[in-house]
Amino acid sequence: MIRKQENLKTFNLFHYLKEQDQQSMSIPYFMANDSTYKNAGVSFPIRNFVYGIGITYSGKPGSVKIGSADYVLQPGSLTTIGPGIVSQWEPYHNAKHETLFFTESIFTDVIKNSFLSTLPFFQPGGQHVIQTSREQTLQIKSLFATISAFRNQPLVMPGLIYSLLMLAQTCHQSAKPAISLTSQQEQVAAKFRKLLSLHVLEQKDVNFYAQQLHITPKYLSEVLVQLTGKTTKKWIDEHLAMEAKSLLRQTSMTILEISFWLGFEDSSYFIKAFKKWEGMTPLAFRKL
């Protein structure tokens, strides 16, 4: 099966936001805040092509779906998303926050950018939102302020962004739960989310994921329902729905191409599944 990967970049949020703010396309980073997103008016699922790291400062709790995982955003929430990951943000979420977007080229000729692949919170199926302490939130805010102050000095920016990433890594390490029965179940759920992100286009059978985790399909669903309220099948369907909605609104791919990309052997099966997920046909969703 041939997938037209070049079509995935029809709409690039990083470039779109920079254009809206009249920023140079040659600079491999961009700082956004709540006003940026409000003015951009993007409400459909978006596939990311760069790295993004953000912090929420204040405001009413909101929500974001990253892959098939739902997260609550509240003051102190640290959000990290890497290339290739699809996310959908709650429309009209007005919480005060800042986000730094950057490409791996920021580290060219400075340090090996391969270290980005060692940060699990940027990878598909990772823990993309964690809650930071008040002290950590203030540290991140201070570093964001420094990055903003030096944003016009490209020779300084790589070191500052690296420092932000190391601080984010420290926050993730301190957020790890203690070993307990619950954490063992959370580990099963985390491993499942990772597997789902990596294999959902080829594997849509619950049995596959259970076998990979060396547990029964029944136990896998029991764990997921207990922790998330969703069965394994529901997780698979929601992940596919996010991928489909992103492709429908973010690319120029045809319905047939999208169905093949998502691993459906026949477009009629994809159309039927999408109607079950969203209550409308893929073409109707594209026209929204």
Image: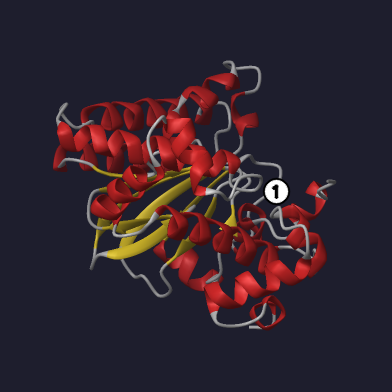
Residue 43 x/y as whole percent: 52, 72
Above/below status of 153 relative to 96: above
Residue depicted at x 41% and y 69%: 90
The C terminus sits in image quarter: bottom right
The quadrant in which residue 21 appears is: bottom right
Please give the residue where the numbered disc 1 appears in the rendered image: 25
**Where is residue 269, by image quadrant?**
bottom right
| Horizontal arrangement in the rendering, residue 227 relative to residue 239 (left or right) | left
> How many numbered circles does the render carry?
1
> Does residue 92 show up?
yes
Q: Is residue 156 left or right of residue 175?
A: right
Rendering coords of residue 273 (x, y %): 61, 70
Picture layout, residue 144 above or below residue 283 = above
Up the image or down, 221 lies above or below 27; here it is below
Looking at the image, which is closer to me, 171 or 140? 171
Which residue is depicted at the point 25% across and 50% down? 227
Viewed as shown, does residue 80 lie left or right of 237? left
In the image, 196 versus 129, the foreground residue is 196
Give the structural element (helix, strand or loop) at label 1: loop
Residue 77: where, in percent of width, then height?
28, 49
In the foreground, 161 or 129:
129
Q: Nearer the viewer, residue 23 or 191?
A: 191
Residue at (36% x, 44% y) in the render: 220
Q: Residues within 10 Å of mark 1 (few under 14, many from 20)?
A: few
Q: Position of residue 138 (x, y in %)?
A: 21, 41
Task: Residue 82: tell me if it is visible.
Answer: no
